[in-house]
Image (cartoon, grey):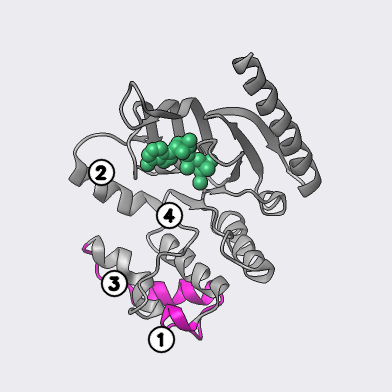
Amino acid sequence: MTQDILRLEGLRKVHGDAATGVVALSDVSLTLPSGTFTAVMGPSGSGKSTLLQCAAGLDSPTAGRVFVAGREMTGDETELTVFRREHIGFVFQQFNLLPSLTVLDNVTLPLRLAGKRPDEARARDILTKVGLGDRIGHRPPALSGGQQQRTAIARALVTEPSVVFADEPTGALDTRGAREVLNLLQQAVRVYGRTVVMVTHDPVAAAYADSVVFLADGAIVGRMADPTPDAVAERLTRLGDDVARAGRAVSE
Ligand code: ADP
Ligand code: MG
């Protein structure tokens, strides 16, 4: 049964203190069904990273509520950490792998942190699926960018999380590496039923998703189902115009 695996209700985030701080998110509500691949797009500074950090429980919203798999992400920090480890995967632009650990040890790390027996068979299986079966003993510095990001995705998937968040996962990759990573994220959704939310500024990358959410000035200003690179690029251009117009209206 499809359920809303991620629910954001009236999220507001002010960075810094309430009086002089920056409003990064103003009133964001969003529900995403399980097994979907969503791209988040918008101009630089529109609140994309803040949205992901709040949704993943890595940052706390100033107001509003976040539900993952039906559970509200509030409360005791220790409990939250346990919940995050089991239910959330996060993929960073700069991979964030530990350079001194092998690929296999990087991937089993979340299991060890969760106090579980590091299931090497499962980690090997996932690494084979992401095409790194012959690289498990290598250390990250010996791998290409695309291979490092695929390792990071394997690490995010190893706990079978409810939602995988990826913030510009192809931002540090060349075209080939980006394609590998996007195919993999798409496969995680279509073949393995995971739910992925990916920030990107690239219309080609966004077109790998099932739908796109457009952010501007900390608010959701549009949605698009079945995106194509051309349709996304065209919508982004208009978004720029809309933001410029809104900015003029404010300053006039
Ligand atoms: P995006 O990822 O879309 O570029 P961000 O979420 O990083 O946007 O930032 C949204 C707004 O919040 C920007 O104005 C940014 O400068 C501000 N911001 C983000 N993080 C912080 C922070 N830690 N402290 C202060 N301001 C921040
Ligand atoms: Mg960002």
Q: For ligand 2, tell me if the residue under mark 1 lies within 8 Å.
A: no
Q: Which residue is mark 1?
A: 137
How many C-alpha atoms fall within 10 Å of the one at disc 3: few (<14), some, or many (≥20)? some
User: In the figure, is residue 26 to the left or right of 233?
Assistant: left
Q: Which residue is mark 3?
A: 118
Magenta span: 115-142
- Rendered image: mark on residue 164: none
The residues tagged by marks 1 and 2 sit, at their Cα atoms, a distance apart of 32 Å
How many C-alpha atoms fall within 10 Å of the one at disc 4: few (<14), some, or many (≥20)? many
Considering the numbered disc 1 on the image, is that residue within a helix, a strand or a loop?
A: loop
Q: Measured from the top left, where is residue 125 in percent x and y?
A: 46, 75
Viewer-side label of 3, 4: 4
Is the residue 95 above or below the residue 228 in the image?
Answer: below
Q: Residue at x 67, y 54 (%)?
A: 205
Contact check, label 3 and label 1, Cβ < 8 Å = no
How many C-alpha atoms fall within 10 Å of the one at disc 2: few (<14), some, or many (≥20)? some
Type of amino acid under label 2: Leu
The residues tagged by marks 2 and 3 sit, at their Cα atoms, a distance apart of 21 Å
- Rendered image: mark on residue 90: 4
The first of marks 3 and 1 along the sequence is: 3
Q: Is residue 98 visible?
A: yes
Contact check, label 2 and label 4, Cβ < 8 Å = no
Type of amino acid under label 3: Pro
Q: Which residue is mark 2?
A: 80
